[in-house]
Amino acid sequence: MLLDVHLNLFESRFEPQLRKEVLLNGRLKKVNAGAVLISTNATVKEVPILISGVLKVLRQDDKGHEVLLYYLESGDACAMSMNCCISGQESGFKVLAEEDSEMIMIPLLVMDDWLRKFPSWRRFVFQSYNDRFLELMHSIDSMAFMKMDERLFNYLLDKKQSSGSYIITKTHQEIAEELNTSRVVVSRLLKQLEQKGLVELYRQRIEVL
DNA sequence: ACATTAAGTGATT
DNA sequence: AATCACTTAATGT
């Protein structure tokens, strides 16, 4: 199966037997950009491990407002999903594909078993929790203590880093939604950044210098 | 040429 | 920093 090839990504991290089990129990899932993987009130019975692409994890409040929590990249597992699986609670968050993405879906049933049997799985799970936790702290810092202009610039740098490209193809509107602010504010702050010579602005495109 | 959508701007809260 | 109301610019048909 194709899963085989993708698993090589974890060669260094997973012990051989664990990889065998992943092969046996996991299923490969491909989604297109924009696809919703987990909607806010779903209960989760599979945990995704990302192979390629980028997933976006958002928190949603009662009336539709969304906050970006963090991005998942290749090799990341969704700690939120694990949490949700274990507690059996409603997700309370939304996951969607930022780009075309591939992932391995691990059924909830085997996870318990693996935790007992495989030290490398234990390490992987804890590491995932830890990584996500740190990113969350980052997001909280940014929301609580940073002004919009800092948040925006930070967002742009993050984007640049994770996509490996200086070009960000998003509208001001879309950025505003992710940062939970208005388009007008984003436009104005971007203008300021442009005047400082940090970015160049085009239609639906921003270049970070 | 016209309609639509993205971005820029001044004024107000 | 948000919202409104409006303008200007780029793009699609």
Image (spheres, coloured by chain):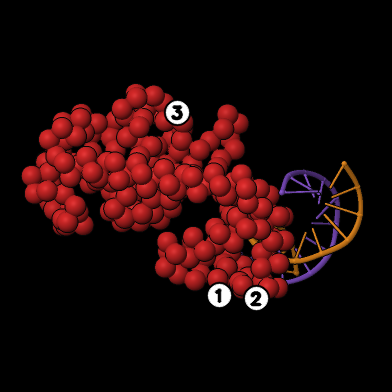
Chain colours: A red, B orange, C purple
**Are dots 1 and 2 in contact, CB under 8 Å?**
yes
Chain at numbered mark 1: A
Q: Callout 1, which amino acid?
A: Leu
Distance from the alpha carbon under mark 1 to that under mark 2: 8 Å
**Are dots 3 and 2 in contact, CB under 8 Å?**
no
Which of A117 and A186 lies nearest the eye of the viewer? A117
Dot 3 crowding, Cα within 10 Å, few <14, some 14–19, many 20+: few
**Residue plotted at (42% across, 61% down):** A162
Residue position marked by numbered label 2 in the rendering: A197
Q: Quadrant of residue B7?
A: bottom right
N-term-proximal mark, 3 vs 2: 3
Q: Element type at marker 2? A: loop
**Residue plotted at (59% across, 61% down):** A153
Task: List x then y, in percent, for residue A151.
Answer: 60, 55
Dot 2 crowding, Cα within 10 Å, few <14, some 14–19, many 20+: few
Which of A179 and A105 lies nearest the eye of the viewer? A179
Task: List x then y, in percent, for residue B5.
Answer: 63, 56
Indicate which label's residue lies in the foreground, 1 or 3.
1
Q: Callout 3, which amino acid?
A: Asn
Which residue, as the protein is rendered here, is positioned at the far top?
Answer: A88
Residues at marks 3 and 2 on the same chain: yes
Distance from the alpha carbon under mark 1 to that under mark 3: 40 Å
**Residue plotted at (42% across, 30% down):** A91
Q: Callout 2, which amino acid?
A: Gly
Q: Above or below — where is A66 with respect to A156?
A: above
N-term-proximal mark, 1 vs 3: 3
Residue position marked by numbered label 1 in the rendering: A209
Confirm whether residue A111 shows in the render.
Answer: yes
Residues at marks 1 and 3 on the same chain: yes
Indicate which label's residue lies in the foreground, 3 or 2.
2
Disc ID at residue A41: 3
